[in-house]
Amino acid sequence: MNKRIAALWKFLTYDIWRITEDEVTRTTFSVYNIIKTIYLCINRFTKDRIVNKASALTYSTLLAIVPILAILFAIARGFGFDNLMESQIVNGFGGPTETTEVILQFVNSYLSQTKSGIFIGVGLIML
């Protein structure tokens, strides 16, 4: 059994990459290409620690939502579209939910803490 596993591992890591299209039939070569693709996906998924990168991206995105929405709300309020913006956010989340209320409260508190728009201007420039 160990010999079979070792032979399969050798085939996946070495032999399959040396086979050319002329050596096997077209169907076999297509199957080998599918096997190579699956092997590369699994290999890169584990080596690149995709799960950790996805969690970090989610975390940083969640931290960036409130300041970005605050900038958008500040611009919308400047043009008198704050009610439209609020209704679009509520509709985008599938109607009035607790999540939308919390997000809008955070945005409003963020905007109320910024005095004279300096933080909004700096945030807009950084964006």
Image (tube, grey):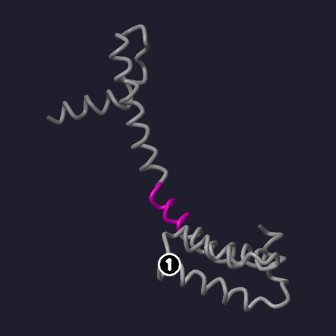
Residue kind at label 1, given as amino acid type: Pro
Q: Count the marks: how many? A: 1
Farthest-out residue, top? 22
Residue 75 rendering spot, x and y as whole percentages: 79, 74
User: Would residue 56 be counted in the magenta stretch?
Assistant: yes
- Residue at 54% x, 83% y is 101
In the rendered view of the protein, which quadrant contains the C terminus?
Answer: bottom right
In the picture, the quarter occupied by the N terminus is: top left
Query: Residue 99, how many percent across, how many down?
Result: 49, 79
The outermost residue toward the left is: 1
Q: Is residue 3 left or right of residue 51?
A: left
- Residue 58 in the image: x percent, y percent? 53, 66
Residue 27's place in the image compared with 44, above or below, is above
Left-right relation of 115 to 112: right
Residue at 65% over, 83% down: 107
Is most of the magenta stretch helix, strand or loop? helix
* Image-quadrant location for residue 110: bottom right
Q: Quadrant of residue 83?
A: bottom right
Q: Is residue 39 magenta?
A: no
Query: Can you say whether 51 is above or below 121 in the image?
Result: above
> Which residue is found at the position 42% from the left and 33% from the top?
37
Q: Which residue does the image show at 50% across and 78% down from the upper left?
A: 96
In this rendered view, identify the residue nearer to me: 77 or 125.
77
> Over which residues does the magenta segment extend?
50-58
* Location of residue 3 in the rendering, given as x and y in whole percent from the top left corner: 19, 31
Going by the image, does 74 lie left or right of 31?
right
Query: Dot 1 lies on which element?
Result: loop
- Packing grade of label 1 (10 A; few <14, some 14-19, many >=20) is few
Residue 30 position by quadrant: top left
Rendered view: 81 above or below 56: below
Q: Which residue matches tag 1?
A: 96
